Amino acid sequence: MSIDKKLAERSNGACELCGSENSVSAYIVAPKDEEIVVCATCLEQIEDNSKVDENHWHCLNDSMWNETPAVQVMAYRMLKRTNQQDLLDMLYLEEEVQVWADAGIVEEEEAQAPTRDSNGTILEAGDAVTIIKDLVVKGAGFTAKQGTTVKNISLTNNHEQIEGRVNGTKIVLLSCFLKKL
């Protein structure tokens, strides 16, 4: 997407995230449809999680302080994606900007990989599963025995985990130790 004059002036013709002047273009920060200027490297990594290079994103410690809310939103999202918790702890966003930033993360999480059991079967909320290995439940003082049925499971933000009740206690279980019934 080409850069209009106002956007080019605001960004000084450089990527608003990393400062690169090479191959810059406009990028729409959903869901508000406001634009920022990004380089080809940032764009590729924003659009494809598998290509994220954490070393490239050290630039966020500068861009997260940008006065433009759309730049703050993208910096926040990339800090979350690259797990830079120390910088996230320092970052303050106005309430409206925080809601905008989180809205984009929810959309990304919804698009993430589905939760699968040990056989690769997709698990959904409300399913029943069987535990395929004895599992020591830390902090609860019991072992979830092989063959135990866990009904009405809940999915978590982590696609490798589910929540369910075992022995009357709600616990988190790794999906790789479960088999869908």
Image (cartoon, grey):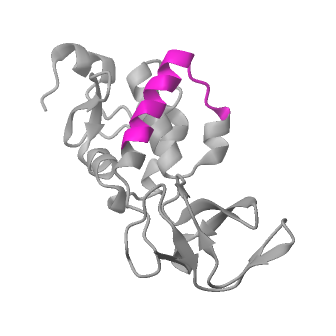
* Quadrant, the N terminus: top left
**Location of residue 147 with respect to 70 vertically, above or below:** below
- As drawn, is 156 to the left or to the right of 110? right
Residue 66 seen in render: no
Magenta highlight on residue 166 = no
**Location of residue 32 with respect to 85 vertically, above or below:** above
Identity of the residue drawn at 61% across and 25% down: 92
Residue 44 placement (x, y as % from top left): 26, 51
Magenta residues, dominant SS class = helix
Residue 152 placement (x, y as % from top left): 54, 58
Magenta highlight on residue 105 = yes
Identity of the residue drawn at 36% across and 56% down: 49
Residue 150's quadrant in the figure? bottom right
Magenta residues span 90-107
Residue 95 placement (x, y as % from top left): 56, 17
Residue 21 placement (x, y as % from top left): 27, 38
Identity of the residue drawn at 44% across and 40% down: 105
